[in-house]
Amino acid sequence: MTDAVDARIAEHGRQWRKKPAVRDIYMDLYRRMAGFLASGPTLEIGGGSGIFKDFAPDTLSTDILPAPWLDLVADAQALPFAPESFANIVMFDVLHHIEFPRAFFSEALRVLRPGGRIIMVEPGISPVSWPFYRFIHPEPVRMGDDPLRDGAPDPNRDAFDANQAIPTLIFGRHAARFAHAFPALKVISKQWLSLFAYPLSGGFKPWSLIPEALVKPVLKLENALAPALGPLMGFRLLVALEKQN
């Protein structure tokens, strides 16, 4: 594997090392993802961070961009694996970067075993988070896009192109269309998370408004409030799907 790393991935790595509050927040989300894993081998898509293996060592880590800690470079819309190769597919901040999510879900169905799971954490566009994502975060939010459109992936497309609204659209406004298109993929969990700590941390921006000592108490408060307030003010969606027999 080449040692070349995209400058944007390298910058995220620098901020990860510099901001312990962000690390604590993200590690909490990774732990939640790991809690949904089925028994068996796991495929990580968009593993540019190189973190998930800390929670599941039996993980094959891939990304569309090369990095020395990855096992393979692969496109989520054309996975180079045999049918029923994996028990899990995990993704952190990936779905909203995929040009044609319908193509990815078709590939996921193909490579997952019966009972296998797709587990993802993505931006969640709620009434409170929308202004943050729309005006502060650099990636666009286009609520009018069709998240399940067909098409041929553009080989020259920037891997960081995105629409942060895609996960919210697929598992919200377009949930019935998704269920019709992929009846074998059952949503077993949809959680609105990250009410306070994540937006206060600034994510991978150089600033933070929350000290590390407050992260765990704030996350504990979020856990208590998220079932009621998450759809109103959550900044993250955790979605787990299971392939039916």
Image (cartoon, rainbow, N blue to C red):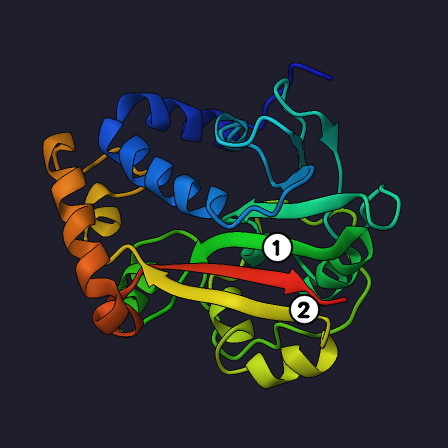
The relative height of residue 54 versus residue 76 in the rendered view (above or below) is above
Residue appearing at x 38%, y 45% in the figure: 29
Do labels 1 and 2 touch, CB within 8 Å?
Answer: yes
Q: In which quarter of the image is residue 139?
A: bottom left
- Give the camera-side residue of 183 and 205: 183
Q: In this view, does 117 lie to the left or right of 239?
A: right
Q: In this view, does 4 lie to the left or right of 30?
A: right
Label 2: how many residues lie within 10 Å, few (<14), some (14-19) or many (20+)?
many
- Lower sequence index among marks 1 and 2: 1
- Residue 241: horizontal and vertical position, in percent? 59, 62
Looking at the rendered structure, the kind of residue marked 1 is Ile
Residue at which label 1 appears: 118
Residue at which label 2 appears: 185
The relative height of residue 237 versus residue 111 in the rendered view (above or below) is below
User: Which residue occupies the extreme top position in the image?
Assistant: 3
- Residue 213: horizontal and vertical position, in percent? 11, 31
- Give the camera-side residue of 55 and 63: 55
The relative height of residue 69 versus residue 144 in the rendered view (above or below) is above
- Asked which secondary structure carries label 2, the reply is strand
Looking at the rendered structure, the kind of residue marked 2 is Leu
